[in-house]
Amino acid sequence: MEHEDKPGNTPPKRIHPIARFLFLTRWLQLPLYLGLVLAQCVYVFHFWIELSDLIGAVLGNQNSLQHILDTVTIKGAERPAKLTETAIMLVVLGLIDVVMISNLLIMVIIGGYETFVSRMNLEGHPDQPEWLSHVNASVLKVKLATAI
């Protein structure tokens, strides 16, 4: 049976083997994105440790207080004996920093995978990030540069 010339019935174009191989190498990025997911897990763990120490210090736990003061005190500077507003602010800013880096990781992981590896087919999903529909390599670079 001969092929009909209908828009939906066009035969796939034959891809040269070298071009096909080069195109398949995009999957080499998958372990890199999975590694970034593991880095995200480290940040989540770090966030909870810092938050629990901050709460512990506020509630009077001496080990938590010492950890917080070790974190926010510059070596050689006078160390406060108790939790101060400045120490709390520095810890909270550190937590915000972790969240911002985590957000950046998500943008790089999801946007990079979608742009360079394979489509995720999230169209119509209620949790699809709105920025994902217009992300490309240039947008990712700008977001990364802005975040840094």
Image: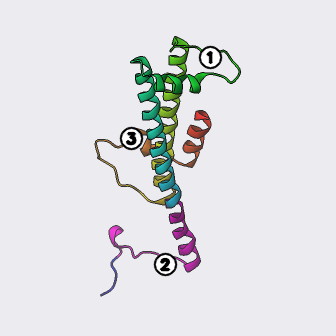
Tell me the mark number nearer the camera, choosing from 1 and 2: 1
Tell me the mark number nearer the camera, choosing from 2 and 3: 3
Identify the amino acid type marked 2: Arg
CA gap between label 1 and label 2 equals 70 Å
The N terminus - image quarter: bottom left
Of 32 and 43, nearer the camera is 43
Q: Is residue 116 above or below residue 2?
A: above
Q: Is residue 136 magenta?
A: no
CA gap between label 2 and label 3 equals 35 Å
| Residue highlighted by disc 3 | 129
Q: Secondary structure at mark 1?
A: loop
Which residue of the protein is positioned furthest toward the bottom in this rendering?
Answer: 1
Q: Residue at x 40, y 76 (%)?
A: 11
Q: Residue at x 53, y 60 (%)?
A: 29
Q: Position of residue 14 (x, y in %)?
A: 49, 78
Q: Is residue 57 above or below residue 122?
A: above
Residue 79: which disc? 1
Of 61 and 121, nearer the camera is 61
Q: Residue at x 34, y 50 (%)?
A: 122
- Give the quarter of the image for residue 59: top left
Identify the amino acid type marked 1: Arg
Q: Position of residue 131 (x, y in %)?
A: 44, 40
Identify the amino acid type marked 3: Pro
Q: Is residue 62 above or below residue 80?
A: below
| Residue highlighted by disc 2 | 14
Task: State which tag comes first along the sequence, 1 or 3.
Answer: 1
Q: Position of residue 47 (x, y in %)?
A: 46, 34
The C terminus - image quarter: top right
Of 14 and 117, nearer the camera is 117
- Magenta residues, as a range? 5-30
Majority secondary structure in the magenta region: helix
